[in-house]
Amino acid sequence: MIQATIPHLVEQLRSIVGSDGVLSAHSDVMVYECDGFVIEKSCPDVVVFPRTADDVSQIVRVCNDGDVPFLPRGAGTSLAGGCLPVGGGVMIVMTRMNEILEIKLRDRYAVVQPGVVNVWLTQALKGTGYHYAPDPSSQGACTIGGNVATNSGGPHTLKYGVTVNHVLGIEAVMADGRIVQMGGPAEESPGLDLVGTVVGSEGTLAIVTKVWVRLTRNPQGYRTMLGIFESVEDATNAISEIIGAGIVPAALEMMDQGILVAVEEAFKFGFPLDAQAILLIEVDGLEAGLDQQRQQIADLCMNSGGREVRLAADASERQKLWKCRKQAFGAIGRLSPSYCTQDGVVPRTQLPAILQKITETGSKYGIRIVNVFHAGDGNIHPILLFDERDPEQTRHVLEASGEILQACLDLGGSVTGEHGIGVEKISFMKKMFTENDLQVMDQLRKALNPENRLSPDKMLPTAGACGIEQKHPSRRAAL
Amino acid sequence: MSATDLLPIDEIQRPRDREELVQCVKSCWDQERAMYPLGGETALQFGIPAQVAGVGISLAEINQVVDFPARDLTVTVEAGTAMASLNKILGDEGLSLPLHVPDVERATVGGVVAANANGPARYGMGTVRDYVIGIHAVDGSGTAFQGGGRVVKNVAGYDFCKLLTGSLGTLAIIDQVTFKLKPKPEKWISLLCSLPDWDGAENCLAALVDSETTPTAVELLSGPTEIELVAELQGDGVAVLVVSCCGTEPEVDWMQQQLEQEWQAQGLSARVVTGTDHEALWQDLVEFPAVAPTALALQANMVPSGVVGFIRQVQAIEPQFSIKAHAGNGVVLCRMPEWPTIGLTEIVVRQLQPLARQYAGNVMVLSAVGSKELTHRCVWGGTEMPFDLMGRIKEQFDPRNLLNPGRFVYP
């Protein structure tokens, strides 16, 4: 097929969504040249804003007819380049499809459009006794469609699971423009789990246009604690002890001294600046059990060498603690002009080993690395601090990141717990999976995205077959 | 009934490890022989009856625990491991995989995952797909592959754990699974009450949605029952509700008191069952789908608010059905000891599937051994699910259609 000229494409797309739904001037589309992964940039040729599933279907058909690549985007909070329009093409931004369509408390589900911001749903549920459980730290900006694409997690996944555990059904536009429904408000339906397959597929199998989500009962109470430790090792030992005692906190987060200093400067909570590590621990559930759990946790922390354990006195102190954690990334601007967050996972018992490795890697490359992460499920987020205007620093950051992720694999973990592969980690797919594994993944993609126009060059190494050189994004960043 | 009674197989191969499994599959691929994966052989009647002659491939000898780092709350186990063996190993460390399936001495890990077999604890603790974090399998051409890993959070690559769960051995033969685990609860009890009328039943279920308690199971039983306690309580009522709660002792004690009060306010009185009595009741609830003699077993899935209406209408059509609903999940299991006089197609396709659709749901036949009416429409039909898309996936994983051919949803 001959690639359509951009003006002709723009005209076709305007006829679907109207003139105010299409951007094509360079000064407009360059806003979309990257997402949260700022090291890689690539402009889409056209950006289009559908309002209905039918709009999306028509847009996809136009792209197919013109042999033009296309990809979906939500709020662009991806930290792995999941929204990067490699090779240009049409970016389908879902943010105008942003309504909560239905809330059915009796059946514990809601129906939302993909552009609904994550936190809006929980806000809409205020007073009902229910909330939407997946709460990534970016929940004030990220969209539920984006959460579905990346199978987003957040700090409460330890007890409540990730996005896929809360999605009952999906309506989506497939790569050929067809609109299908998979699952729905009923918990089970015959056949393959297409919902579970599409969630986390990073926009490479379908474009989500509606989601049925499970709602979760609000816990009766919370106990939120701050464990203060003299060393990172003591803190990670405490984590092992807590989990090993059969306690499953709702959240178990760690911040090291580096990030603590920035957060304290920004929010003035009263964090002790000389602590090497703090644990933010939250248990929730029935009031009848919370004090016992709290005491158990406090004892385990102190027995692991903790300096003290502070209990959030009331709801507002709890909110403040969580604000510090969830906005920690926003405080990084005080530390350096640029940062690169990694997203590896190790078995919990390997946390001391990976944190040691991170420290060593930072020293090796002369890069400051601070840590704030979901310690309870072994999901680390080392934050590498640098200045992206300096190509040598950028190169070192990429090399250090690579070493840290390889270490995660060596310790039996994964290269991504929640951010996804995107473009950032395509080179790691061959380290984590065998050729057979990748071949079978390619089989799946061929089944649902056979022409490979939907989100090309994402997630899997570029060639389905072996022998063809894969693109290496970091090389482009260094040019 | 054994595999050779229920399937058109004249031999059963028993590979002892993954390598031998791969060889078995490759050999069948080369000879274009149909393959029927076998675990504990407890659910062979599920699906459209097999028609294509082939070979059974038993995973029974691929049955080792590969890795059990208890403090990481994960376990990696081969597919032929019996659920009872796995439960014992986990229990010794104070852990559990809260998937309660019938016939645990025979049911295997691979079979449970392939059939997506779930039990009453699904309300509070989730289902198979919430626990599988890593999977190894061999596709129809003999390609061995894996998805997921051994960590509880992992979004690298496509989620084969989800794709293969419930795929009924039609995409690949599962040979190893990694599960995430939960700590064993300290205490577990059940509360039962008799529901005198259906409006009261729906009010009671709706009230549970607002309750501050956090039940693990919400089971609604109606019609003929073999469970003595339920029969005793049902009396002249329309149904019996069983709510099971687990957790620490103070939590469970509080939930018991709270539910007793909530039910009292609705004019219902609670019978509390604890200790070994609770365990026996729980076992009866778990075994429900497999109780013999059963000529016909169905699973209807719908929104939870449809359960009462669905059960009422099912009983009006056929009062012989024994019914147990996971009422909080909208899953209704229906069992009959004899054939419905009006025939399977009439009852399932013409009456129950449209009824379930009224509640945004569907009906699947779990077993109807010997029936000549087990068509695709009867077993899997009555929904708008994109079976053709699933068929495209099947074509990629099993291009010669050798894995459990003709039994699942593919057109």
Image (tube, rainbow, N blue to C red):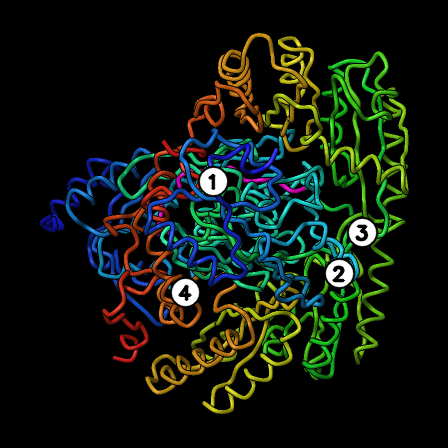
Give the Cα distance between marks 3 and 2: 22 Å
The residue lying at 52 percent from left, 42 percent from top is B166
Q: Nearer the viewer, residue A247 or B47?
A: B47
Contact, CB < 8 Å: mark 3 with mark 2? Answer: no
Pointer 3: what residue?
B185
- Amino acid tagged 1: Asp
Whether labels 3 and 1 belong to a single chain: the reply is yes
User: What kind of element bears circle 2?
Assistant: strand
Secondary structure mainly formed by the magenta segment:
strand
Q: Earlier in the sequence, mark 2 or mark 4?
A: 4
Q: Nearer the viewer, mark 3 or mark 4?
A: 3
Binning the other alpha carbons within 10 Å of mark 2 as few (below 14), some (14 to 19) or many (20 upward) gives: many
- Amino acid tagged 4: Ala
User: What kind of element bears circle 3?
Assistant: loop
Asked if B230 appears above or below A97 in the picture, the reply is above
Pointer 1: what residue?
B10
User: What kind of element bears circle 1?
Assistant: strand
Give the Cα distance between marks 1 and 4: 52 Å
Taking the image as shown, residue B379 lies to the left or right of residue A42, namely right
Q: Nearer the viewer, residue A32 or B195?
A: B195
Q: Nearer the viewer, mark 3 or mark 2?
A: 3
Give the Cα distance between marks 2 and 1: 62 Å
Q: What are the residue bounds of the magenta stretch? A: A203-216
Give the Cα distance between marks 3 and 4: 39 Å
Pointer 4: what residue?
A80
